[in-house]
Image (spheres, grey):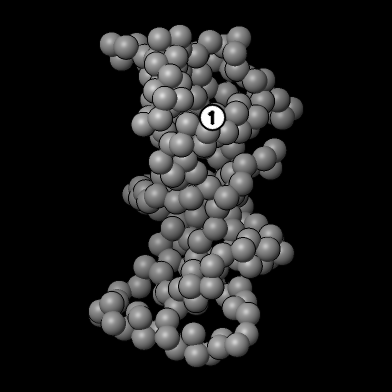
């Protein structure tokens, strides 16, 4: 852990999080914390837990990587078929949890899920490594797989198919955005007397801020 991370952690724990220090816009507040986490060299600062639910109310969660956060919402990319895609299609709401353990900080995002445009997905897909793009073509996400050898053979098949050419965006791959209606910021404090602030979106698009019991 770097000296900066240690100092940041100590400062957060002992000085806490005050409402006066919060940005009125939770996305800007999130961007501020994300920048801080990057500077502190937090391990995989963009990683988050994506939680979805089936129509029957059965939850599922998996780790993902954030690829953008702005006034429109929080974006990530994945297969558009498979379990999580099916759950988001059937129940278009999700929760995202970010945890920067070195800084003893957590952010929770809840909201509606929408698909990104094909143009946005193509732009991001083009930035991925060739191997990752081949993998997107080869994977039948969430389907049973007899062996790893079968998967690697599919990767080789697509390597041959696109040999000497660019690897285009598959029809079964793209981006999603969680449009938040609630965002919570959590700062750890001694004796579990943590600071928690929850932003809730108003009908006019503004945000209300409330301190919560830890």
Reply above or below: 169 against 23: below
Q: Nearer the viewer, residue 138 or 202?
A: 138
Which quadrant holds residue 22?
top right
Residue 36 is situated, as x and y percent measured from the top left of the image, at 54, 29
Q: Is residue 118 left or right of residue 34?
A: right
Reply above or below: 123 against 36: below
Residue 129 is situated, as x and y percent measured from the top left of the image, at 54, 67
Please state, as top left, top right, bottom left or bottom right, where the N terminus lies in the image: top left
Q: Nearer the viewer, residue 167 or 50?
A: 167
Q: Is residue 113 among the parts visible in the rendering?
A: no
Q: Residue at x 59, y 58 (%)?
A: 175
Residue 28 is situated, as x and y percent measured from the top left of the image, at 65, 29
Q: Residue at x 57, y 11 (%)?
A: 19
Q: Is residue 11 among the parts visible in the rendering?
A: yes
Q: Element under label 1?
A: helix
Reply above or below: 210 against 165: above
Residue extending furthest left?
Answer: 147
Which quadrant holds residue 26?
top right
Which quadrant holds residue 121?
bottom right
Residue 103 is situated, as x and y percent measured from the top left of the image, at 41, 26
Please state, as top left, top right, bottom left or bottom right, where the C terminus lies in the image: top left
Q: Residue at x 51, y 18 (%)?
A: 197
- The residue under label 1 is 36
Q: Residue at x 65, y 57 (%)?
A: 116
């Amino acid at each position: 852990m770097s000296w900066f991370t240690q100092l940041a952690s100590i400062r957060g724990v002992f000085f806490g999080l005050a409402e006066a220090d919060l940005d009125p816009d939770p996305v800007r507040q999130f961007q501020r914390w994300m920048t801080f986490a990057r500077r502190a060299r937090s391990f995989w600062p963009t990683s988050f837990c994506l939680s979805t639910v089936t129509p029957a109310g059965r939850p599922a969660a998996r780790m993902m990587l954030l690829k953008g956060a702005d006034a429109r919402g929080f974006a990530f990319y994945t297969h558009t078929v498979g379990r999580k895609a099916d759950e988001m299609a059937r129940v278009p709401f999700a929760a995202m949890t970010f945890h920067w353990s070195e800084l003893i900080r957590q952010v929770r995002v809840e909201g509606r899920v929408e698909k990104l445009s094909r143009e946005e997905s193509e732009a991001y897909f083009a930035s991925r490594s060739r191997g990752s793009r081949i993998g997107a073509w080869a994977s039948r996400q969430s389907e049973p797989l007899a062996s790893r050898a079968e998967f690697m053979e599919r990767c080789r098949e697509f390597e041959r198919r696109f040999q000497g050419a660019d690897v285009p965006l598959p029809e079964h791959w793209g981006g999603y955005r969680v449009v938040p209606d609630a965002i919570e910021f959590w700062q750890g404090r001694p004796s579990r007397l943590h600071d928690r602030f929850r932003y809730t979106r108003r009908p006019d698009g503004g945000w209300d801020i409330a301190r919560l019991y830890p």
